[in-house]
Image (spheres, rainbow, N blue to C red):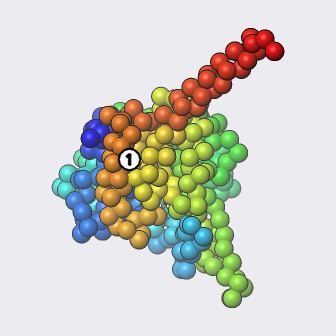
Amino acid sequence: MTDMRARLGHAELPNPILTASGCAGAGRELAQFFDVARIGAVVTKSVMLAARAGRPTPRMAETPSGMLNSIGLQGPGIDAFLQRDLPWLLSRGARTMVSIAGSTVDEFAELAARLSDAAGVTAIEVNISCPNVEHRGEVFACDAGAAAAVIEAVRARARYDIPIFAKLSPDVTDIVAIARACVTAGADGLSLINTLLGMAIDVDTMSPALAGTTGGLSGPAIRPIAVRCIWQVRAALPDLPIIGMGGVRTGRDALELILAGATLVSVGTAIFHDPSACVRIARELEEELTSRGIERLPDAVGLAHESRKAARRRLAGTARSAVGRKP
Ligand SMILES: Cc1cc2nc3c(=O)[nH]c(=O)nc-3n(C[C@H](O)[C@H](O)[C@H](O)COP(=O)(O)O)c2cc1C
């Protein structure tokens, strides 16, 4: 059997499958289906400083092979999270990656400082797909300078031994430029990808399907985009830990992201119709790796890049010998 252990900063995980932020609350809802310590880690819904109600309903719409959501950053705020959710996750032996979101750089920094004083934080995922209220509402993740400013501030206030992952948006022209800016600013890894901005219109009512008009597209429809983003970032920054996500429903899907360069894989939308999806996908992934004779999970990370290089070398060799041959 393949050795499925993976790393998240200093923590050893039993396997590389995580929940995706916003798709499993703070893990409590999943505990009725399986022991939350069995999966790699729980990634929490993005926590903000203050409690928020989220956006108006309807805020979910089904689309072909996907889903649109405009939940917004609904949640009880950092105080309730620290009092109630984090101690619960710790008591269950779960590894916890806390996702944070803010509307100013200072809010992100304050959240990092508050989490650094608490027990049970394995890593911080910085959700920079939020509007920057100090800059005309432009999404932090869509501007390299704004993204870097958030990561630099979070790194400065977070405890040195807590790894920081910047979660990037695919809604940019050059994701590698944003990735590089975040890494230069101190990110220890990247989470790829957040939802894509989409919209659906109900042709019966002849009005937008979501009360918030636009929403984030997730599910299998976005997996090729996730694979492309992970591939591009892995090619540019080969040693960087990447948490891959976007449309993973099976162990085979998870393997696709790993072959592109993901070191860990988060599962989001699939949890809504199969709450045990993370446990099932971890088992299926192990079977996929074992059947390919891969002894250790890290041996599969980015393997598709190696196969591509080997194929290129083979082609170049064939071309050279063809040139050398007499007609
Ligand atoms: C209902 C819903 C809520 C989400 N909330 C958050 C969130 O709070 N923070 C965040 O960083 N991403 C959030 N996401 C994005 C997911 O974490 C993930 O990046 C995206 O959905 C792609 O993965 P998937 O196709 O497996 O769902 C949310 C996604 C969904 C579907």
Residue 158: percent from left, percent from top:
38, 39
Is residue 215 found left or right of 293 in the rendered image? right
> Residue 325: x and y, percent?
75, 12
Give the quadrant of the N terminus. Answer: top left
**Eyeballing the image, is 126 above or below 133?**
above
Which residue is outermost to the right? 327
Q: Nearer the viewer, residue 14 or 129?
A: 14
Q: Is residue 309 above or below residue 119?
A: above
Which x, y percent locates residue 178?
A: 61, 39
Query: Is 130 placed left or right of 75 in the picture?
Result: right
- Relative to the observer, which residue lies in front, 244 or 141? 244
Q: Quadrant of the C terminus?
A: top right
> In the image, 206: left or right of 63?
right
Task: Tell me what residue is drawn at x 65 percent, y 57 percent.
Answer: 137
Q: Quadrant of residue 230?
A: top right
Give the number of callouts: 1
Residue at the image position 28 percent from the left and 48 percent from the top = 95
48 and 300: which is toward the camera = 300
Q: Is residue 108 visible?
A: no
Q: Position of residue 150 (x, y in %)?
A: 53, 43
In the picture as drawn, the residue positioned furthest to the bottom comes out as: 204
User: Can you see residue 205?
Assistant: yes
For image coordinates 69% across by 15% down, the residue present is 321
Figure quadrant of residue 234: top right
Report the amino acid beneath label 1: Glu
Q: Quadrant of residue 271?
A: bottom left
Residue at image mark 1: 288
Q: Is residue 219 above or below residue 158?
A: below
**Label 1 CA crowd tier, 10 Å (few <14, some 14–19, many 20+):** some
